[in-house]
Amino acid sequence: MKEKLDLLLREGAAKIEAAKTESELQEIKGALLGKQGAVTELLKELPKLDVSLRPEMGKAVNNVKNLLTEQIEGKREELKLKASEISPDFDCTLPGIKPRIGGLHPITQMCYDLNDAFRSMGFEIFQGPEITSEYYAFDNLNFPPNHPARESMDTYWLEGHDSGEANEKLCLRPHLTGGSVRYMQKHKPPYRFVYPGRVYRNETTDARHERAFFQYEALIVDKDLTYTSGKVMIKSILSKVFGQDVPVRMRAGFFPFVEPGFEIDMGCLVCGGKGCSVCKHVGWIEIMPGGTPHPNVLRAAGVDPDEYTGFYVNIGLDRLVMMRYGVDDVRLFHGTDLRFLEQFK
Amino acid sequence: MKLSLNWIKDYVKIPENMDLKQLAYDLTMSTVEVEGVHDLGKQFDGIVVGVIKEVLPHPNADKLRVCKVDIGTEDIKDIVCGGSNLEVGMKVVVACPGAMVRWHGEGEPVEIKNTKLRGVASFGMICAAVEVGLADLFPTEDDHGIMDLSAFDCEAGTPVARALGLEDMILEIDNKSMTNRPDLWGHYGIARELAALYDLPLAPIPAYTPGACEEYDVRILDEERCPRYIGAKIEGLGVKPSPFEMQSRIWRVGMRPINALVDVTNYVMLAVGQPTHVFDSTHIVDHIEVRTANEGEKLKLLNDKDLELTTDDLVIADKEGAVALAGVMGGAKDSVLPTTDSVILEVANFDSKTVRRTALRYDNRTEASSRYEKAIDPERCDQALSLAMRLFSELYPEMKVTAFTDKYPNKLVKKEIDVDFDWLDRRLGIRVPEDIVKKKLGTMGFEVTYTDEGMHIVVPTWRSTGDVSIKADIMEEVARMYGYENFQPTPITTSFDSAINQLDMDLVRKVKEYLAFRAGMQEIFTYPWMTDSFVNAILPTTDGVLSLSMPPSPTERYLKSTLLPNICKAIVKNERNFDEFAIFEEAEIFRDTDYTSEYSEIEKLPYQRKHLGCAFAGKSENIQALFREAKGIIEDMPRYTHMEGFNFRKVEKPYWADETVWLNIYLGDEKIGDLALLSKKAALACDIKVLSAILVELDMDSFKPLRSRTNRYVRVPEYPTNEYDISFLVDSSVKWSEIYSAVLPKKSDDNLLREVLFVDEYKGKQIPEGKKSITLRLVIGSGEKTLTGAEIETVANGARKKLSKAFGIDVRTV
């Protein structure tokens, strides 16, 4: 009987420990201590024993009964604390409810990325007026008097302000460089600033051409500076924006307001420079014009070109964003279609 | 522009082993963008000369023949062919299996395979000119005509490309990359660049000296716009095809050979970049004059376009009238005819802007006009004249120049520039060795004289028409020829005076980020012009609205004077796809007023301000929720963006707003915007079909950023505060602002009532008509002790009394 009792205690304890729910525990309790429970059955057998053994065994059985009861109650407490009040059918795989998150326009995002990069290099941000006089759009920038860009086929002139002297003619700014002169006139060199903004050209639109598009102009003017510093600047900025080392090359290019002027290419990130359809199989993508501000431009800004020189780039934001995301139609940027805009979180 | 490498080699001996990829790269880096290098010979791979040995009938087809053809292999090949001009002994073009041809000159090239035609095996194909892309050089009248090479000295089996001298590389140059370089618009100009790049000698073009002859009568009546005119009467000519190599060269770079007289003029232009023209001399009456066109003067061009000229055009005329549009195109009447045997050769220089404007005016840009408009130097006429005379004398040994004149009233002055080394070295960052500078500049035609401090440079005429005029231009020439990639990158040095502090710039960004990321709105961009239908919906009048003189479309002439029309357009666009959305735009608006400029006294710019426009579009069932959301976002904006706060007033209803649901937004006592429901009428005019929209417009330039964060620390309450809700019925017309000010104690009172909050407004079942149920929350607490229930009840009862008194209602204890 003693062995039976020991076994009962060992097995009972193990069962209780293994119980996972209160109902399971209740069953175990019944099987051990209930009316037909194993321990109760043993108690019932006590009278059959020799009288001399009865007190000792009675004590032992009661002891086991108490130990088990204690353990069951302990376990019950433990299970109670652990238990969830929620039905096990609760579905944790349902999607989360997200806060309504809007977004900045992908061009704004790129612009802010560039702002951050340039600010970290000590550049100020400048913004100028969108309606400008011809004087600031062309004359200050060394555009010859009859340059094709001045004509209405390229520039949006304002009704009632489309003839007369250069200071009287008004247009939507055709580029930002004229505005840069405004900054320089108001400040003293050396300069280090960027000028993000939208510009307007009167042209036929298609997937690669828009009437309104974004430029991002950066200008340094200082005493001793060579174009190779400009290359360092562009390379660091692009590498920061694209999160990887970006090869940059500068080749001969012509723009009236720079001398010397460059076309600046970045290595194609799609094919790594091997050549693909994105880069027209040359491994390079034309990304911006740049160069040293023409002495006449510096003069217009009131800066002595013999003392100061500089470096200028004008980044086409639309092109850069198109490359960043693989957008294939520039008109989407002004299309106001939320199905497009919401993709850029 | 296309260039033939073989042609370039006439002028500069490019080493045979030169890597053409490298050449294209070097040219791209230093001079012009080479868009592609095309191996012309490759196009003719597997296409060889065959000699027809026998022509046999085809057993199964009447129109086909079986030719026995020698293609230089050991065996004679059988080739089935349908050509109409097949003859024994004829040299033909055989496309062997593997070669690419275009069937009947149409569609994509297809690969030739060994095949059976109507049961007879055929090795490849005997080709017509169109099938191998040579129709321009071998024109036939018969569609079934086989290309005949019998005139060529070549053996069976010779690759056709070699037999015809077509083993050439064609460089494709991006025209946009050389708009500033009139000297580059021909093979000779590019050859000069290559000579300088690779330090090779450049072959000179020998000068032409006219023999003794009559003076040809040329009168320049507008010397300003025609700086030079050479006229030469040449007799003893005739219309015939030009030699094959001349035709081939013209064709290889993208033009069509016509006849020897015209081909010479085109060849000269393609060689040296100077357009020339020939008139049939029998048609020129008396003399040639260069003059301004008369208003309405008529001219029929070579391409049969009938023009009515203006006084802005420059024409070549004879005694009777205009014969050509100067620099653009010849007239039909006096051009080369089949009977022409004597010509007037024109080699002239015209004003670039005149040519450009005229070509654009009549939508008639030509190879000639696109060169003239780049400003060619008048001295180039000498090169063109000598080359033309040489070619004419080669083609027509009998020819004679019977009259000649060279009118060049105002000689082009070469630019002269002084460059000091100190400046050059500083700008370049290194000293480029003198011998390199001298050699490169010398090859490009610059005359360089060294002085103690620098160089005195005389610019060649072909760079003196605007391209090179200052020392920065010389620096560019030195740098690009030395090689931009040979300069070491130099880091940028910085000096810090003070940290960048641009509160206004930062504020704009904070506002946009607040709207996007806290308020869950999407930023949009729209054009600066507005569409008429939306303008009419939003604006009471277009007075004071600026407009474009040549708008993108007739209904998009007005420039934004408010952001709302374009925002409404965006609502229309998106309501198809979304039930609710919130958008914003930050952009400039313009008005025809307050002309001024902060930059220059001579400039007067119109009123332009940065505005913020927002739209909250949603279903019409719950305007109040939509309105409160919009209001909440605007109310909280100053807090999150660190600017001075707004207040709302009801002073002036915006034109486009609903009669009831509108507010004006104020900053202090200055009105800076509106927040309102778009009226039903305006929404209909905008064609917004389903959704309702709360619109907001704010003048962002009025925003006042705080100089730093201005929050003051407030002690956290030591004793608990209690919330106590009161519900009551009140007339529907009573506004929350009235309730709020009725309950909230004045500042001076030392009151336990800390705050009054709105909880809920309810109308509907169980609420009598004309009433609404309001639930508000009192926040009650003391700075000195924990309040007892009775004390809290007293405060609440005070509020109830105030409400009862203010609105004549009975607000009972619940």
Image (cartoon, rainbow, N blue to C red):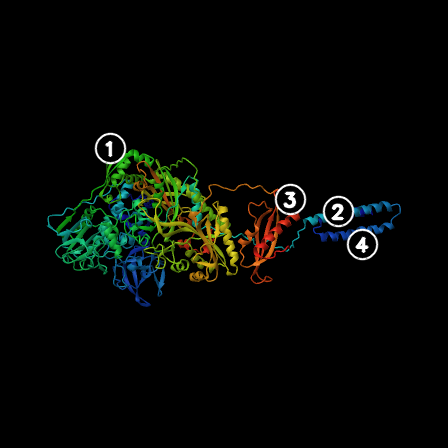
Of the residues shown, which amino acid type is indicated by label 3?
Thr
Query: Is the residue marked by circle 1 packed among few (<14), some (14-19), or many (20+) residues within 10 Å?
Result: few
- Label 1 and label 3: CA atoms lie apart by 96 Å
Q: CA distance from mark 1 to mark 2?
A: 109 Å
Report in which chain the residue with disc 1 lies. B
Question: Which residue is the site of mark 1?
Answer: B451
Pointer 1 and pointer 3 on the same chain = yes
C-alpha gap between disc 3 and disc 2: 46 Å
Q: Is residue B258 left or right of residue B723?
A: left
* Tag 4 and tag 2, C-beta contact below 8 Å: no
Position of residue A189 measured from the top left corner of the image (x, y, whole percent) = 36, 38
Assign a secondary structure to mark 4.
loop
Q: Chain of mark 4?
A: A
Residue at 76% from the left image edge and 49% from the top image edge: A12
Which residue lies under the disc numbered 3? Answer: B786
Q: CA distance from mark 4 to mark 2?
A: 19 Å
Q: Split into 4 quadrants, where in the image is the C terminus of chain B?
A: bottom right
Q: Chain of mark 2?
A: A
Q: Nearer the viewer, residue B201 or A264?
A: A264
- Camera-nearest residue between B510 and B199: B510
Amino acid at dot 4 = Lys
Mark 4 neighbour density, 10 Å: few (under 14) some (14–19) many (20 or more): few
